[in-house]
Image (cartoon, rainbow, N blue to C red):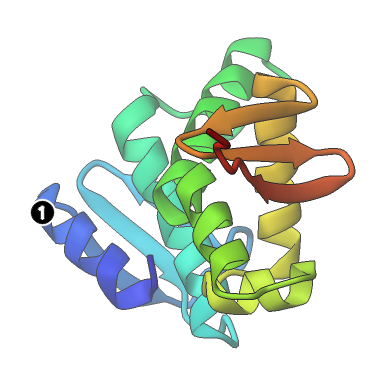
Amino acid sequence: MNYEQLLTTADQNDLVVKEQPLTDHDGLLRGKRIAIRKDIETQAEKSCVLAEEIGHHCTSAGDILDQTDIMNRKQEYRARFYGYNLKIGLTGLIRAYEAGCRNLYEMADFLDATEEYLKGAIQCYKSKYGVCTAVDNYVVYFEPFAVMRIIATD
């Protein structure tokens, strides 16, 4: 999903998104309001931040800014995972492969994400699924990263 699509998703969840001059964070959720740091340079980076903040809305409760608390770290992980699935997802990795993307730079560009965010998503999927997982007629390998189409033979 690109930034505009994520704004629509936020609106469908009754969230108000505003760009603000934040100094300590790229994004912040307070109640039904999401603040995105105003001076983020690219739409791709903004969309990654917004996906995670929507993830916080859907998975987190309370103030979790203190990341020394293990329960807050768990909520942060859940929100991040939700954002990865919303923004990229295993099907997004497959779509990028089918579109001819052959490296992380091309995939990130295709998915309107930053390379860092894409790497984080792949690492998160690896920690959940292990070395690989099957999706429809594809196998997605996480280390080394690869997507392979399964071709049935009669």
Left or right: 64 as drawn, with respect to 66: left
Q: Residue at x 77, y 67 (%)?
A: 104
How many numbered badges does the structure rendering display? 1
Q: Position of residue 140 (x, y in %)?
A: 67, 40
Q: Residue at x 24, y 41 (%)?
A: 31
Compared with residue 131, is residue 48 higher up or lower down, i.e. above or below? below
Q: Residue at x 48, y 82 (%)?
A: 43
- Work out which quarter of the rendered image holds the N terminus and state it: bottom left
Nearest to the observer: residue 37 or residue 77: 77
Nearest to the observer: residue 75 or residue 138: 138
Q: Position of residue 21 (x, y in %)?
A: 48, 77
Compared with residue 23, is residue 55 higher up or lower down, i.e. above or below? above
Residue that lies at the very extreme toward the front in this rendered image:
154
For residue 94, which quarter of the picture? bottom right
What is the secondary structure assignment of the residue under circle 1?
helix
The residue beneath circle 1 is 12
Compared with residue 75, is residue 39 higher up or lower down, i.e. above or below? below
Q: Residue at x 35, y 47 (%)?
A: 54
Q: Position of residue 147 (x, y in %)?
A: 69, 49
